[in-house]
Image (tube, grey):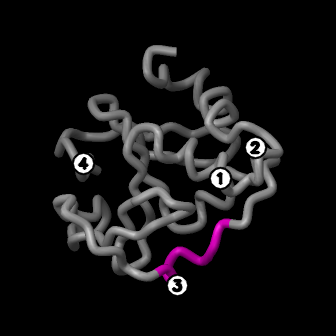
Amino acid sequence: MDCPVCSVPVIVVERQGIELDYCLSCKGIWFDAGELGLLSQALQIKTAIPDIMSLAVVASQEKKRPCPRCDKKMDKIELEGVLVDRCPNGHGLWFDWGELGQVLERTSAGAVSGGEQVIKFLGETIKVGGK
């Protein structure tokens, strides 16, 4: 699978039964449908992540990116105030570097730092931002 931003092959990272597709170049992360919920469960973050297919498409000047699964142009949606890419066929979500932590922090109602939890969760496998 190629990164929808850089067009380079992504690596597959598995942690606690969750497979994530990660781009070493731009540090973006692809979540197949349902994996975002699995991540919040694994991190024990109580979130209110909505059904992503029910979210309205947002107008954006950002270039539309191809879904890494079906190659259709992805929609831009707003998830907790963060603009992310969603496959129109429901294959999953693409998060640019830093966006996932922002979404988890906002959906966890401040109970935990989602960004720090994500880095801790993935940090053994991926060096995020040089940390």
Q: Which residue is mark 4?
A: 2
Read off the magenta span. Answer: 49-55
Q: Earlier in the sequence, mark 4 or mark 3?
A: 4
Distance between mark 2 and mark 4 Cα atoms: 27 Å
Distance between mark 3 and mark 1 Cα atoms: 19 Å
Q: Which residue is mark 1?
A: 106
Mark 4–mark 3 CB contact (< 8 Å) = no
- Is 59 located above or below residue 121 in the figure? below
- Is 125 located above or below residue 51 in the figure? above
Q: Which residue is mark 2?
A: 43
- Judged from the image, the secondary structure of the residue bearing numbered disc 4 is loop
Identify the amino acid type marked 3. Ser
Q: Which residue is mark 3?
A: 54
Q: Earlier in the sequence, mark 3 or mark 1?
A: 3
- Judged from the image, the secondary structure of the residue bearing numbered disc 3 is helix
Distance between mark 4 and mark 3 Cα atoms: 26 Å
At horizontal 48% and vertical 24% (from top left) the residue drawn is 128
